[in-house]
Image (spheres, grey):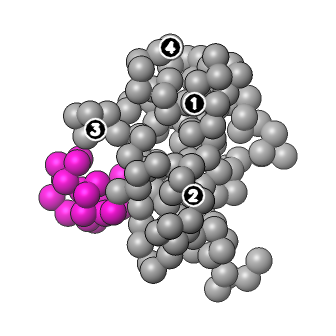
Amino acid sequence: MTSDKIRKNGGGRRAPASDKPAASDPWRRLLGRLLEEDEAKCALQLSTIAELRELGARGVVLSLEAAGERTLYPAFQFAESGRPFPEISRVLRIFSGAADSPYTVASWLMSPNPLLDQRTPAEWMRTGRDPELLFEAARRSAAPLAH
């Protein structure tokens, strides 16, 4: 893959430019609401977009590069308070170095998981279930990706 076909994304990984979704494609159907930078900045009560981007770069929140040089933030990672679920950063660390793209992690977070009683990891976080079981599910899913 040539460097002009890849873009830096929120978790420090690189995703092929072709992975960038348009506003009305299947990624939005799978991932649900995707917040624009201004929306995510307000939800997190941050002063600047730079602060938000730093949280993405540090793996505190999941950020997704999108078409049109936009960065989007899946709403499923945020509690009603607007703060990210505390488990999200650890899940991102578990997948760091294993997943080729943050879209892989986002897809995993929205896919039913047998270890989580067929609930999605996002639902598992939202309903306050055992975080250790969530992390084990993440480890089991990330391990084969690292090889």
Q: CA distance from mark 2 to mark 1?
A: 16 Å
| Farthest top residue in view | 130
**First in residue order: circle 2 vs circle 4:** 2
For marks 1 and 4, give the one nearer the viewer: 1
**First in residue order: circle 3 vs circle 1:** 3
Foreground residue among 48 and 20: 20
Labels 3 & 4 near each other (Cβ < 8 A): no
Where disc 4 sits, the SS reads loop
For marks 3 and 1, give the one nearer the viewer: 1
Q: Which residue is mark 3?
A: 83
Please tell me how crowded label 3 is: few (under 14), some (14-19), or many (20+) other residues with Cα within 10 Å. Answer: some
Q: Is residue 48 left or right of residue 136?
A: left
Query: Is residue 33 in view?
Result: yes
Q: Which residue is mark 2?
A: 27
**First in residue order: circle 2 vs circle 1:** 2
Q: CA distance from mark 1 to mark 4?
A: 13 Å
Which numbered tag is attached to residue 130?
Answer: 4
Q: Which residue is mark 1?
A: 120
Q: Is residue 67 left or right of residue 19?
A: left
| Farthest right residue in view | 147
Query: Is residue 93 in view?
Result: no
Q: CA distance from mark 3 to mark 1?
A: 19 Å
x 25%, y 40%: residue: 82
Please tell me how crowded label 2 is: few (under 14), some (14-19), or many (20+) other residues with Cα within 10 Å. Answer: some
Labels 2 & 4 near each other (Cβ < 8 A): no
**First in residue order: circle 1 vs circle 4:** 1
For marks 3 and 2, give the one nearer the viewer: 2
Labels 1 & 4 near each other (Cβ < 8 A): no
Which numbered tag is attached to residue 26?
Answer: none
x 41%, y 40%: residue: 77
